[in-house]
Amino acid sequence: MTEKIPTSKDVVAWLNERFAARNLPYRLEHLAVLPYVNPMWLANWDVPQLADAPERDIIDDEIREARWKFPMVMEEY
């Protein structure tokens, strides 16, 4: 049986749940899915929507965890 490849919506839903659990006011609408794997991130997606958020330490922890859980995703609008 083949495993389903996660989509950008899967990552958005997971991160939004994590932000809610930490009482952060942010909710994502989309991810930037790259056509390649960035060796610095080991993932093919990024979250530019939160680049200027003040709680960077907490947000970076959640994004780092999400990159381990969802290293490769397919774009889904």
Image (cartoon, grey):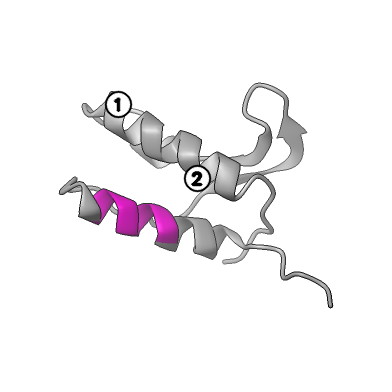
- The quadrant where residue 17 appears: bottom left
According to the picture, the residue beneath numbered tag 1 turns out to be: 56
Instruction: Identify which residue, 66 or 74, lies in the foreground.
Output: 66
Q: CA distance from mark 1 to mark 2?
A: 15 Å
Please indicate whether residue 52 sits to the left or right of residue 62 in the image. Answer: left
According to the picture, the residue beneath numbered tag 2 turns out to be: 66
Instruction: Identify which residue, 38 or 14, lies in the foreground.
Output: 14
> Vertically, is 68 above or below 77?
above
Q: Residue at x 23, y 29 (%)?
A: 55
Alpha-carbon neighbours of circle 2 within 10 Å: few (<14), some, or many (≥20)?
some
Location of the C terminus by quadrant is bottom right
Q: Residue at x 33, y 35 (%)?
A: 59
What percent of the width, then of the height, locates residue 11?
50, 56
- Residue 47 visible at all: no
Q: Main secondary structure of the magenta part?
A: helix
What percent of the width, then of the height, locates residue 26?
24, 48
- The quadrant where residue 50 appears: top left
Q: Residue at x 64, y 62 (%)?
A: 6
Q: Residue at x 29, y 54 (%)?
A: 27
Please indicate whether residue 4 sits to the left or right of residue 54 in the image. Answer: right
Q: Amino acid at mark 2?
A: Ala
Query: Farthest residue toward the front?
Result: 1
> Vertically, is 43 above or below 5?
above
Q: Amino acid at mark 1?
A: Arg
Q: Which residues lie in the magenta part?
A: 14-20
